[in-house]
Amino acid sequence: MKVIDIQQRTPEWLEWRKKGISATSCSIIMGENPDKTKLQLWRELVGLDMPPNLGAIPQVRRGVKFEPLALQAFEDKYGQIGLPICAESSEHSFIRASFDGLIADGSPVEIKNLADDNHLDVLKNREKSRAYKLYSWQVRHQMIVSSAARGYLWFWSPKHEPLCLVVERDEILEQRIIKAEAAFWGLVQSCTPPEADPDRDLLPHSQIDHDRWSTLAAIRRDKEEAVLAAKKELEALTGAISIIDDQILALMGNFKRADAYGVRVTQYDVQGRVNWKAVAESVCEAIPDDLVEFHRTDSRTATRISVDTAFDEKNYKPEVMPQPRMADGKVDTHALLAAGVFTF
């Protein structure tokens, strides 16, 4: 392990992270992260997309705020000092880690200050919890950097009891991670995008029939404008009708039925809806998940299409893919050839 003399969450630290794979990327590269795909991560690392501002998320800000308290609680409970350091793997320098705490034997301590529901799920289900399954990948990546035999997930909360779960080394899984991260880092260096996930990624621009799509998009924008205009007119008519209806009802006095001059009015009572979930919860303390699933109807694929009617195709610029570059700034044609970007 090579320790890097750099302070976490500084501009220098952010630049250092860009030059390798961090522990938070491990679950993504292994296809185990529900929130981000390999293509999305790749686009961020090659500079096509800006990474999300995690500092704007209240839960993340709270986690950073309480991290020193959580680490102190771990040290007090287990009598171990955890050092918040940055390091690279001695064998694979692109594999990097920013440790919340690294104890004397090289074991990483990863601190998680979760939302209440997620923390309670960890207390109940331990290694079977969603949080453990997700963040254990982060710890395994850190263990590769520090060559540790085990790592620790320290789930700490200011409201609930903390829990420490151990992540034991798995050499076979470790080699899988190294191989997958090396392959992914090669794609970053050669600027070769990984395969898109049809279920979660946007259709890549390179796979779009631009001539046909642009033609259909222009027609679709025109129709959307017509629909919006019709909806606006309908809204105005509906408002006018409502005013007239109120005046007609006022003419009826206590009567609930009327028919005159081509306008028939019938007023009737409508019974309120039953909140069946509230009924079930009043009968039993909690509705079993398997019972809910048993009564769930078949799933279907829904489609949502949004249209920018102000889109100006004259200002449209096709996406330009980044090019691999050597240290001196020249285009690395050897990397392009190796990646199959072009051939001679």
Image (cartoon, rainbow, N blue to C red):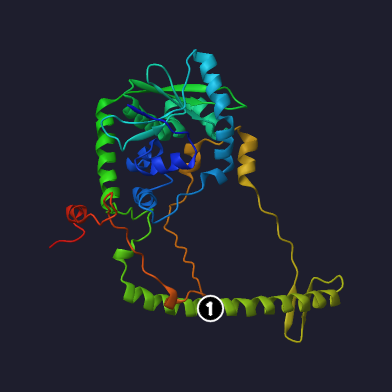
Please name the amino acid that badge 1 sits on.
Answer: Glu
In the rendered image, which residue does mark 1 sit on?
225
Within the image, what quadrant is residue 232 found in?
bottom right
The picture places residue 321, in percent across and down from the top left corner, at: 32, 60
The residue positioned farthest toward the bottom in the image shown: 261
Residue found at x 52% / y 75%: 310
The residue positioned farthest toward the left in the image shown: 344
In the rendered image, is residue 115 in sight?
no
- Taking 27 as reference, is 124 left or right? right
- Taking 66 as reference, is 95 left or right? left
In the rendered image, is residue 226 in sight?
yes
Q: Residues within 10 Å of mark 1 (few under 14, many from 20)?
A: some
Q: What element carries label 1?
A: helix
The picture places residue 290, in percent across and down from the top left corner, at: 47, 37
Foreground of the two, 328 or 35: 328
Within the image, what quadrant is residue 23 found in?
top left
Q: Locate the N terminus by quadrant.
A: top left
Residue found at x 56% / y 26%: 68
Residue found at x 28% / y 49%: 327
The picture places residue 280, in percent across and down from the top left corner, at: 61, 39
Foreground of the two, 228 or 263: 228
